[in-house]
């Protein structure tokens, strides 16, 4: 038989008992409508139970991804004017109801799963009286399973013509777009589950993130790296200059901190003979929040024995290009107002060359650096010239680095874990990768001289307040170096920022499923009279 033609789609969400759109509701009116809608849903919940149906569902095997069903459906498409195919395959899908509209003895649903969305037609005659009673209990947001024949309607809509309906989960809450939509960015982050259901492209972004992370792992394992796990609780935080989160272990009665970097434990593994290692892990820095910073973030660190910072540049390019391909990101893109080309070799420019070009100072002359910094309003009093130089670079050069560009050969005094260039002890073999004025990667030729490392640690510690990251010497790390760490290159890449770039997100909070937020009061938990 020829499938029936569905009614035309309304422009607004389907009516499931909500008020008509009109003048904005007062707070009291809105609460009243919300209460009525919830009551309606709970009444349907009770009706399902009375029908002997579990409103919270059960196992539903064999469901096909909707995207795969749609691919199969494309083979059934007929030219305009020709009758639709009547012999489409039998399919089974499960998903959430995103649209619902009734037409007498027919109900049309838009069903969505992680992979896509498709129309379903429920006919009273086709599904039978028992399933039709269940169909009368459906609301937007409910999760159902469908068995049926795949085809096309006369109006050209790919449709599953249902022969069976299985109820899987009841949604008690009315979808947010019934009133004013989920538009508040903080609410989207706080209730990420709703953002994933209703936000345009949100689910795709986090699927892309998963593919990016998988690609990073694959790139490294293909190159012989071993994935390892270091401790997140440490006696003292090292490997970066940052303020850690503090905690306490009750059984051992000892203070601990959450790690701020992965570096020092991974280098111990180089000493132990694991010559290529990496970790993709969470690190924690007790610092501010911004569109580029979250106190808890995901960091890749990789270390390669017998490599250096040049081999880390090659690795960085491979990691980013492969991740872009996995995410479906074009090699050329516009992001944050910058034109970026990931397809060609990344530019490499010397730190001093860039500073000279942008500021006009002589980077090899401390007096010139300090004078230029003071003229630009930076605090220079009593500060090491290389620290002043670093702040001058950050304030003057970083924002203009559209990139991708490797800035190489940093001032040695600000790089305590980095090997010095041969014949140039004032220069560290370090690079940072910049894209759109933002740092994406940091890499060194690793310092493996234990005596120099201890000396540099002591120099650094002397200038740090007690609550800073390296306020305690990691004596065991120095001991490990004394046993002999091979020459090596090391790399760190901020995964969240990489995902921002490859999904063209403007804020780091848009690529972290559950970013840190201030506590929010739920009005439903308020004490009576509060």
Image (cartoon, rainbow, N blue to C red):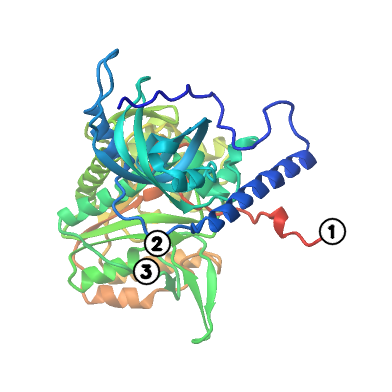
**Location of residue 241 with respect to 449 vertically, above or below:** above
Is 529 displayed left or right of 197 in the figure? Answer: right
Query: Disc 1 marks which residue?
Result: 529
Image quadrant where residue 220 sits: bottom left
Is 523 displayed left or right of 6 in the figure? Answer: right
Of badges 3 and 2, nearer the viewer stands 2
Q: Going 25% across and 16% down the picture, which residue do you hit? A: 79
At label 2, counting other C-alpha atoms closer than 10 Å, the crowd grade (few under 14, some 14-19, many 20 or more) is many
Q: Going 52% across and 55% down the picture, which residue do you hit? A: 51
At label 1, counting other C-alpha atoms closer than 10 Å, the crowd grade (few under 14, some 14-19, many 20 or more) is few
Spatial separation of the CA atoms under disc 1 and disc 3 = 63 Å
Spatial separation of the CA atoms under disc 3 and disc 2 = 21 Å
Query: Disc 2 marks which residue?
Result: 261
Q: Secondary structure at mark 2?
A: loop
Image quadrant where residue 92 sits: top left
User: Which label's residue is closer to the chain start, 2 or 1?
Assistant: 2
**Location of residue 363 with respect to 84 vertically, above or below:** below
Number of marks in the rendered image: 3
Query: Disc 3 marks which residue?
Result: 455
Spatial separation of the CA atoms under disc 2 and disc 1 = 47 Å
Q: Quadrant of the C terminus?
A: bottom right
- Comparing 311 with 247, the one in front is 247
User: Which label's residue is closer to the chain start, 3 or 2?
Assistant: 2
Q: Quadrant of the N terminus?
A: top left
Q: Position of residue 330 (x, y in %)?
A: 29, 31
Q: Secondary structure at mark 1?
A: loop
Residue 329 in view:
no
């Amino acid at each position: 038989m020829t499938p029936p033609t569905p009614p035309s789609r309304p422009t607004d969400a389907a009516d499931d008992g909500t008020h008509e759109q009109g003048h904005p509701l007062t707070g009291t009116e809105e609460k009243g409508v919300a209460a009525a809608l919830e009551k309606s849903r709970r009444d349907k919940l009770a009706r399902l139970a009375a029908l002997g149906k579990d409103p919270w569902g059960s196992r539903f095997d064999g469901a096909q991804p909707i995207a795969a069903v749609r691919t199969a459906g494309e083979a059934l498409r007929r030219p305009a004017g020709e009758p639709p195919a009547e012999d489409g395959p039998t399919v089974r899908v499960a998903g959430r109801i995103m649209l619902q509209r009734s037409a007498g003895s027919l109900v049309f649903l838009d069903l969505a799963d992680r992979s896509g969305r498709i129309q379903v037609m429920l006919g009273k005659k086709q599904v039978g009286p028992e399933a039709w009673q269940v169909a009368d209990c459906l609301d937007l947001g409910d999760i159902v399973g469908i068995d049926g024949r795949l085809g096309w309607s006369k109006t050209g809509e790919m449709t599953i013509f249902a022969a069976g309906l299985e109820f899987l989960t009841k949604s008690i809450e009315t979808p947010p777009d019934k009133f004013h939509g989920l538009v508040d960015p903080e609410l989207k982050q706080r209730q990420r589950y709703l953002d994933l259901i209703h936000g345009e492209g949100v689910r795709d972004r986090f699927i892309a993130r998963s593919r990016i992370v998988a690609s990073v792992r694959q790139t490294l394992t293909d190159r012989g790296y071993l994935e390892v796990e270091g401790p997140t609780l440490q006696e003292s935080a090292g490997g970066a200059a940052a303020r850690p989160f503090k905690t306490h272990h009750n059984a051992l009665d000892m203070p601990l901190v959450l790690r701020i970097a992965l570096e020092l434990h991974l280098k111990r593994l180089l000493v132990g003979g694991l010559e290529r290692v990496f970790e993709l892990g969470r690190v924690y820095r007790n610092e501010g929040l911004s569109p580029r910073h979250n106190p808890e973030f995901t960091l890749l660190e990789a270390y390669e024995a017998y490599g250096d910072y040049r081999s880390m540049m090659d690795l960085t390019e491979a990691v980013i290009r492969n991740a872009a391909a996995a995410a479906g990101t074009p090699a050329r893109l516009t992001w944050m107002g910058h034109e970026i080309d990931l397809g060609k070799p990344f530019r490499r420019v010397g730190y001093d060359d860039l500073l000279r070009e942008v500021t006009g100072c002589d980077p090899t002359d401390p007096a010139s650096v300090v004078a230029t910094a003071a003229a630009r309003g930076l605090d220079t009093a009593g500060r090491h010239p290389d620290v002043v130089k670093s702040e001058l670079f950050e304030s003057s050069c970083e924002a203009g680095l559209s990139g991708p560009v490797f800035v190489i050969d940093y001032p040695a005094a600000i790089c305590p874990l980095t090997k010095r260039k041969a014949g140039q002890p004032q220069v560290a073999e370090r690079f940072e990768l910049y894209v759109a004025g933002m740092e994406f990667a940091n890499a060194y030729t690793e310092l493996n001289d234990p005596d120099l490392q201890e000396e540099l640690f002591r120099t650094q510690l002397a200038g740090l307040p007690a609550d800073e990251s390296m306020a305690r010497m990691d004596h065991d790390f120095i001991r490990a170096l004394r046993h002999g760490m091979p020459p090596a290159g090391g790399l760190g890449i901020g995964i969240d920022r990489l995902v921002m770039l490859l999904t063209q997100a403007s804020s780091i909070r848009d690529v972290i499923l559950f970013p840190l937020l201030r506590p929010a009061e739920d009005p439903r938990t308020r004490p009576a009279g509060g």
